[in-house]
Image (cartoon, rainbow, N blue to C red):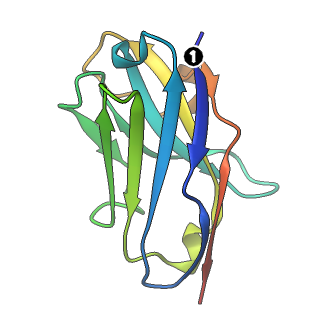
Amino acid sequence: QVKLVESGGGLVQAGGSLRLSCAAAGRTFNTYTMGWFRQAPGKEREFVSAISWSGRNTAYADSVKGRFAISRDNAKNTVYLQMNSLKSEDTDVYYCAAGPRYTEIVATTSDRYNYWGQGTQVTVSS
């Protein structure tokens, strides 16, 4: 089992930046694909980005490519999401998730992820 705790959300003006962090409890963090998803009230959870267990492979939703960057520090059991050039449509609750293990193929659908954090609110004012 992996326990995930997100932090770093908040209120930012359009064009600004935020960095989300997701700290994992457990010794096996470095075996998991890690992903970020987001969800607005009444909407389905949406894929944002993911990174393979080694960190060599990443994937991004088209809506965030070129603006967001995912990274991980396996020594610190932490995955990050650097969000730049934020837009009002990026306003959502952002969730960290742990998915498939021991693979460089990066999963982009929520059904592939077994462990989820509680979410952190990101609000972008225009």
Looking at the image, the residue that sits furthest to the bottom is 126
Looking at the image, which residue is at 28% across and 22% down? 105
Looking at the image, the residue that sits furthest to the front is 76
Looking at the image, which residue is at 61% across and 36% down? 5
Could you say which quadrant of the image residue 117 lies in?
top right
Give the quadrant of the N terminus.
Answer: top right
Horizontal side of residue 69 vs 17, given as left or right:
left
Residue 53 % position (x, y):
30, 21
Residue 10 % position (x, y):
62, 67
Give the quadrant of the C terminus.
Answer: bottom right
Looking at the image, which residue is at 42% across and 18% down? 29
Most foreground residue, 32 or 75: 75
Look at the picture and state if 74 lies above or below 49.
above
Looking at the image, the residue that sits furthest to the right is 42
Indicate the secondary structure of the residue bearing disc 1.
loop
User: Which residue bears the numbered disc 1?
Assistant: 2
Most foreground residue, 23 or 81: 23
Horizontal side of residue 54 vs 21, given as left or right:
left
Horizontal side of residue 121 vs 107, given as left or right:
right
Residue 61 appears in the figure = no
